[in-house]
């Protein structure tokens, strides 16, 4: 008599079959082969069609630099003095926090000192005056200090040289262990000009990874980029607007459990 027969006689055939199926299905879920992944995302998509979540409040306004904007103002990138004016105007209109899902990775090429070297047929007196004017990046930095602004940064698939000097600290704390091995990891980090980073209220990643079919179904709120744990752009906006000094990441042996700021606890999957 085999062990399976003895098990069936002791616990009953139906329970034995159910137990074996449970073990087999658990092993299949842990292995997570492509057919199981495909079934899972298609069921998720079906739920979104049958019962989509309806937003009852819309506290976020997107300022879209669209074709109409480009026709009215000119081609992108705009001078950062204009971006500074945009930030100031939004703050005056009541925006609690402003965030950019673009990266100001290089100094503004439209600054007066750059024009002094780029324009032809300028007399030396004019060049001297242009070199003496405030740079566009300094104007933007001044506007950042007067408002609550979160600058966006991007994770890269390869490491890149980082700007010289100490980067502004990220307000993060961990509880229950190091979450690094669970987080979405980008080998590189594309940052903003250091002058702007130091003037901003925060920095967050707006990089995401789509599913295998190109559809975005999950968005990480904490990630790792070039060895640094960083909040997403959205989570950093929430930190700034809530007045929190840090984002707290809780994790255990099963992975990341949640991320929280003052007044908010956001549950996540094991990968944040």
Image: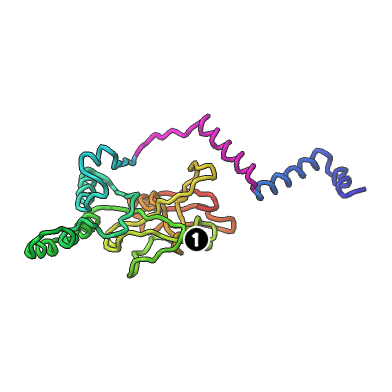
The x, y position of residue 72, in whole percent, is: 20, 39
110 to 128, vertically: above or below: above
Residue at position x 45%, y 54% from top? 222
Q: Secondary structure at mark 1?
A: strand
- Name the main secondary structure of what is drawn in magenta: helix
- Which quarter of the figure has residue 134? bottom left
- Closer to the camera in the image, 28 or 109: 109
Which residue carries the number 1 mark?
175
Question: Can see residue 145?
Answer: no
Q: Is residue 94 left or right of residue 26?
A: left
Q: Residue furthest right?
A: 1
Residue at position x 8%, y 65% from top? 124
For residue 37: magenta?
yes
The region drawn magenta spans: 32-58
- Closer to the camera in the image, 173 or 189: 189
Q: Residue furthest front?
A: 121
The x, y position of residue 47, in whole percent, is: 54, 33
Residue at position x 64%, y 47% from top? 32
88 to 132, vertically: above or below: above
For residue 73: magenta?
no
């Amino acid at each position: 008599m085999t062990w399976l027969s003895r098990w069936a006689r002791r616990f009953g055939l139906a329970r034995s079959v159910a137990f074996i199926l449970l073990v087999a299905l658990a092993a299949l879920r842990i292995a997570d082969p492509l057919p199981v992944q495909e079934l899972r995302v298609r069921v998720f998509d079906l739920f979104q069609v049958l019962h989509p979540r309806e937003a009852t409040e819309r506290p976020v306004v997107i300022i879209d630099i669209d074709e109409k904007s480009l026709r009215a103002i000119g081609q992108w990138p705009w001078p950062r003095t204009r971006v500074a004016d945009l930030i100031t105007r939004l703050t005056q209109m009541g925006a609690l926090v402003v965030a950019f899902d673009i990266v100001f990775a290089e100094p503004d090429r439209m600054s007066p000192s750059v024009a002094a070297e780029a324009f032809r047929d300028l007399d030396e007196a004019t060049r001297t005056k242009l070199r003496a004017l405030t740079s566009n990046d300094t104007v933007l930095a001044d506007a950042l200090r007067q408002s609550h602004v979160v600058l966006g940064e991007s994770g890269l698939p390869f490491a890149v040289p980082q700007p010289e000097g100490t980067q502004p600290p990220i307000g993060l704390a961990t509880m229950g262990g190091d979450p690094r091995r669970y987080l979405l990891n980008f080998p590189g980090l594309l940052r903003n000009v250091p002058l702007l980073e130091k003037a901003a209220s925060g920095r967050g990643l707006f990089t995401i990874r789509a599913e295998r079919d190109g559809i975005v179904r999950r968005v990480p709120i904490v990630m790792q980029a070039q060895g640094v744990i960083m909040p997403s752009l959205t989570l950093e906006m929430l930190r700034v607007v809530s007045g929190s000094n840090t984002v707290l990441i809780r994790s255990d042996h099963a992975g990341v459990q949640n991320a929280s700021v003052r007044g908010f606890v956001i549950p996540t999957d094991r990968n944040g």
